[in-house]
Image: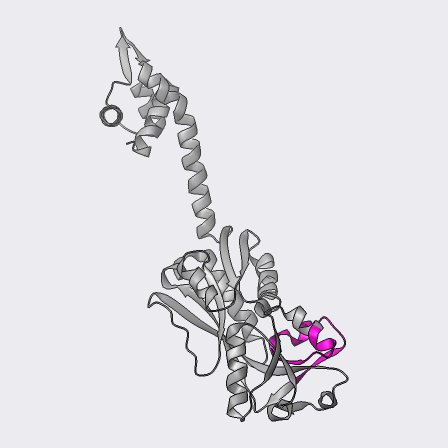
Amino acid sequence: MFDSRHIRTFHEVVACGSYSAAARALGYTQPAITQQMKALERAVGTPLFTRIGRTMQLTEAGRSLARHADSILGSLSAAEAQLKAYARLSTGRVRVCGFPSVNVTLVPEALSGLAASHPGIQVELLEGEPPASLHRLRRGECDITLAFTYPGLREEVPEEVHEVRLLEDQLTVLLPTGHPLARRRAVNLADLAEERWIAGCPRCRANLLHECAELGFVPDIRFATDDNLVVQSLVAQGLGVAMMPALVLPSLALTRVCGRALQPAARRHISAYVYRDHLRIPATAVVLDELKRVASNRVGC
């Protein structure tokens, strides 16, 4: 209904007490002030000013608008300041959805860099395994999704979603430290054919079954969990071995487990997914850039 320019002019007319005084204060001509006030009165549908002799006074509607003008202009100023802050990357909120192993490694390192370079950007961290995490992106529940795929598996995403490859993460086997194969630097997957296994999320379990089938055996899966700490605890108790991404090995919480490279070598691909339109949002772009920077410093990227 209202043109913000007309509200600003109206506010100045009320403060100055006349069209001519407002014109001098704003650097306008008096006819320009008159035209703006007439346009504002047409917008509200009722007169805002009345003249009694040589004195201009506010009508009841004018007094009502005057009471609101300060808050209207204050809100506009606050909005302008906030939008400028977004454009300058001094503020903003970005929702990042990652899977557990990336949320304890890449993401905290990236957030540390952001805290130093862009302290006004707030990151909300969510968790989800693919493909459910991609569904959250499509539903608008997050701005950036981090997901992984295995060789031969390509993520199905809409055309408007952009994929940014971050790194390739080598797969390892998690063993109890007392296991006979723990003395080796690398372990042949075929040598684990008789072991009990602890499987991860459905996507990781499917890859485990595929890798083992390629070598002619079916793994004896006794437990399944997508909690990396639970996997470590089960392995530490000697309840099985597990296929584990190398990304999480530096953050192993238990001393009774160790990670060893698998032969033949196997890797998973880690990518970030974001809607192409969101790449133009400064805060989202800078978070994505920081994730890329951190990933590029990782071995195997």
x and y percentages locating residue 249 in the rendered image: 66, 76
Magenta segment includes 249: yes
Residue 128, compared with residue 218, is above or below; it is: above
x and y percentages locating residue 214 in the rendered image: 51, 91
Question: Which residue is depicted at the point 52% across and 73% down?
Answer: 202
Q: Looking at the image, what colour scheme do you see? A: one colour
Magenta segment includes 72: no
Nearer to me, 41 or 221: 221
Residue 24, compared with residue 83, is above or below; it is: above
Specify the quadrant that holds the N terminus.
top left
Residue 253, compared with residue 7, is above or below; it is: below
Specify the quadrant that holds the C terminus.
bottom right
Question: Which residue is depicted at the point 74% across and 72% down?
Answer: 254
- On screen, residue 218 versus residue 51, left or right, reads right
x and y percentages locating residue 93 in the rendered image: 50, 52
Which residue is situated farthest in the top direction here? 53
User: For the magenta stretch, what is the residue range?
Assistant: 234-260
- On screen, residue 301 versus residue 259, left or right, reads left
- Tell me where residue 248 sits by quadrant: bottom right
Question: Which residue is depicted at the point 61% across and 88% down?
Answer: 262
